[in-house]
Amino acid sequence: MPTFRRSSHLRRAALAAAACTLVLPAAPAAAGTLSTPAPAAGATAVLLGTGAKGVKPKVTAAPRGVVVLGGADRRGRLALAVVRPPGAQGGAVRLRARGSLKAKPAATLAAAACGTSGPASRLRTVLRRGTLNASDAKALGAAMERRACGRASAADSALLARLGLGQPANPTTGAAPQPGGATSPAPGASTPPKEILPPPAAAPKPAPPEEPGSYGACRDGVDNDGDGQTDALGEHGNPDPGCFNENDRTETGETTASAACRAVSGVSMNTPDPKAAFAAVNADCGISSEVVVTVQPGILACDVFTGVTGYVCAIHPRWVGRTYQYLYAGSATDIFDMPLTLTDPVDCSKPATIALRRPDLSVEEIVEPIEPCPF
């Protein structure tokens, strides 16, 4: 019985075709987009939804100054935070990723989303930091995760307040809550009759409107309380610890640290280098969640050593060399050391300032001469 053989050139052609089939790449998944409005100025908004598995969304458009945090976990669950600091513009935020992106506002996240591998942990990823520096944006992401999961600390509240961020946005409208928590009734909902109350005996007189071009005490360039410190960011001098942020209307509020604290803390010059200083705070000063150090004529670089983890020393990006330094973290501490590199030789004729912000948001300060200071 005869047999038949495929010719060798036909076999080679078939093998080549099979090899080409194996190496052809799969078609990429279609790109999905998501659009969400930025919250009101000074507000934050958290969104939860679904997205491409393990893919980091990309911000394709956002209003100037708006911060975007978040990403998707391996199961495709998506968590995003949109933050609009004071001064940032309003408008739509648009994101893109492979697959589909769907999300809706959520005031708080469920326990399933807040687990070790849940999407809430993606809020620590900075997709767009707007006008914030990298350190503030990273710390804000961690604070947003803890707040969305019901684990916010006093230090988180202090950080949000320092950045001028208040309550979360209304999860249904994206608008900031009204004073007193008042909300508008849903369309078609019946409104209960209002209780008629007598007018108050002496209603407080509202403050006069701010005239164009005028500013609060913490950004007007004037030492309003006469303590040698000016404004929140110190554009015209040392930053004033009495300013909670640049929107604070008064520079007062800080108190002097105790004599025991001042006796064991301060700034010294212990090396032959006139640009090398050392700041220290010891246990007699109590617990602090944020520290601001000021040395004239300015600080170029700094480092920090504490007994707890998570603290970072950085120079405010707007005022490099303008002496505004800060120390922040999620845990409070009572002891820290901070080596400093100054912009120019130290000015021993001017005292150094160490401001201690407590977990309850009160501020105490140490204003002492630099000792020793042989220069």
Image (tube, rainbow, N blue to C red):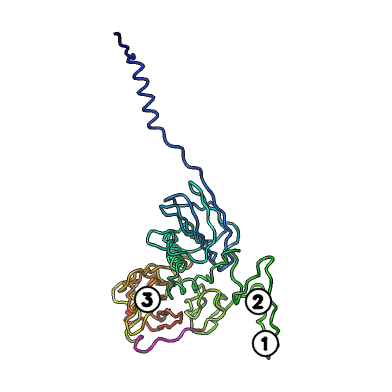
Q: Is residue 355 visible?
A: no
Among the two numbered marks 2 and 3 on one chain, the one whose residue lies closer to the N terminus: 2
Which secondary structure lies at badge 3? strand
- Residue under circle 3? 332
Say above or below: 296 vs 129: below
Amino acid type, residue under disc 2 in the picture: Glu
CA gap, disc 3 and disc 1: 41 Å
- Residue under circle 2? 210
* Image location of residue 159, percent across then percent down: 46, 71
User: Do residues under tags 1 and 2 come within 8 Å of each other at their CB atoms?
Assistant: no
Which secondary structure lies at badge 2? loop
Amino acid type, residue under disc 1 in the picture: Ala
Which secondary structure lies at badge 1? loop
- Residue under circle 1? 203
* Image location of residue 215, percent across then percent down: 60, 75
Instruction: Let me know if residue 255 is in the magenta part.
Output: yes
Q: Does residue 216 appear to the left or right of 239 in the view shown?
A: right
